[in-house]
Amino acid sequence: MVTRAQHNPMPPLNAYVSSLGGSPIRSLLSLAQDPDIISFGGGAPASESFDVEGIGKSYQRVLEEHGPRALQYSSTEGEPELRRAVAERMTYNGLYTEADDVLITSGSQQGLGLIGQVVLDPDSIVLTENPTFVSALQAFALSRAQFRPVDTDSGGLVPEALEAAILQYAPRAVYLIPTFQNPTGVTMPESRRREVADVLARYNVWLIEDDPYSELRYDEWTMTPISADPRLTHKSLYLGTLSKVMAPGLRIGWVRGPQEALDTLATTKQGTSLQTSTIDQLAAVDWLEHNDLDAKLVPIRAEYRRRRDAMVEGLDAVLPEGYTLNTPMGGMFLWATLPEPFDASESVMDAVRAGVVYIPGMQFYVADPKPSTLRLSFVSNPVDVIAQGLERLRTVFQ
């Protein structure tokens, strides 16, 4: 009988990667898997918004019409039909794109990881908003990048502060989420986007523009991506995804960028995953061909707006007097700041014991973390469940 050895030491792991540790946010979200806990933590779209029937029909059609192809290996760059569909959607949203400008990835998180490997050397400086998306920091940290914050205000990154930081730190890249930013929900106005583009056009630095949320807008307007500025064509890497508008389980994302960069990203992708699932790509294309995405998004946007408003209104009876709160024009998140001496990190386990989860804001900072901040997601739960969760949260902060 073969048994596991009890005393032999395990061979060593990569010391640097092992030192990074896991994500505290992921640890909190694992607690939210308990069905008795109401989660305001993760950025998960509402499951009831998924077109399960329509997506199922797409898989069925793909298997019936293209079965051998759908189950076979395919190109690292992505299926041609999907690259064309993505390029058409980005062009429709103000960012002129051709199919050859697109690399399909297994979710935009893979795109962030590939960009970290290809663009960043050890000790390369990345300028970021502060706070910013934790998983992007994790992806770039694997390349041993160093992070420096740039001042922000209610309109996002401050252009003058960006130029000063570029001159001070000589960064390799600037990472931005200009539309419905995670975690703050802030959207950079058009005038400031032009100012940021003016700054970036003057320097030899990459723009990494992350845009997972712009389709989830709650008013009739769109914001032009910074990457649309033609002066940035050769120095912009733009990330998008179907996770928030179709289904995150499909793991369909993309990177738009200059050809030489995409070639290197594709070579790097070959060394880690070879390709993105063929059948998932073809099913996504089929669904997009048989459905009007804009029409599908109308009721989703309306429902998410209801949920946002319900949480904003309900929080007034939950958070302590003197709090501040954003009301984002789209996306998934509310960002609250509590009055001193409240510490959202110290209260989070009290919230878990009360049956509700939020994310302490300290996790999102690259410098000078503010313990009084917290992020709440409003899209995952219907209005009545939001009310229940807020009542549980009230016992923590009141």
Image (cartoon, rainbow, N blue to C red):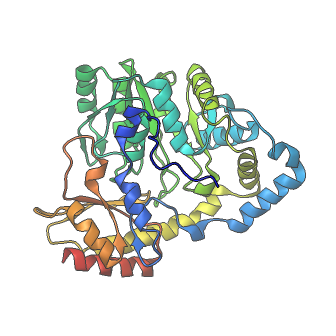
**Which image quarter: residue 300?**
bottom right
Give the residue drawn at x 45%, y 37%: 209
Up/down of 235 relative to 180, above or below = above
Q: Which of the two residues, 96 or 311, is positioned nearer the viewer here?
A: 311
**Which image quarter: residue 374?**
bottom left
Give the residue drawn at x 46%, y 45%: 223
Q: Which of the two residues, 372 or 11, is positioned nearer the viewer here?
A: 11
Image quadrant containing the C terminus: bottom left
Up/down of 124 relative to 99, above or below = above
x, y percent for residue 130: 28, 43
Q: Is residue 229 visible?
A: no
Q: Is residue 362 left or right of residue 104?
A: left
x, y percent for residue 141: 38, 35
x, y percent for residue 120: 42, 25
Q: Which of the two residues, 42 or 203, is positioned nearer the viewer here?
A: 42
Give the residue drawn at x 39%, y 17%: 204
Q: How many marks?
A: 0
**Which image quarter: residue 175?**
top left
Up/down of 238 relative to 60, above or below = above
Q: Is residue 210 left or right of residue 174?
A: right
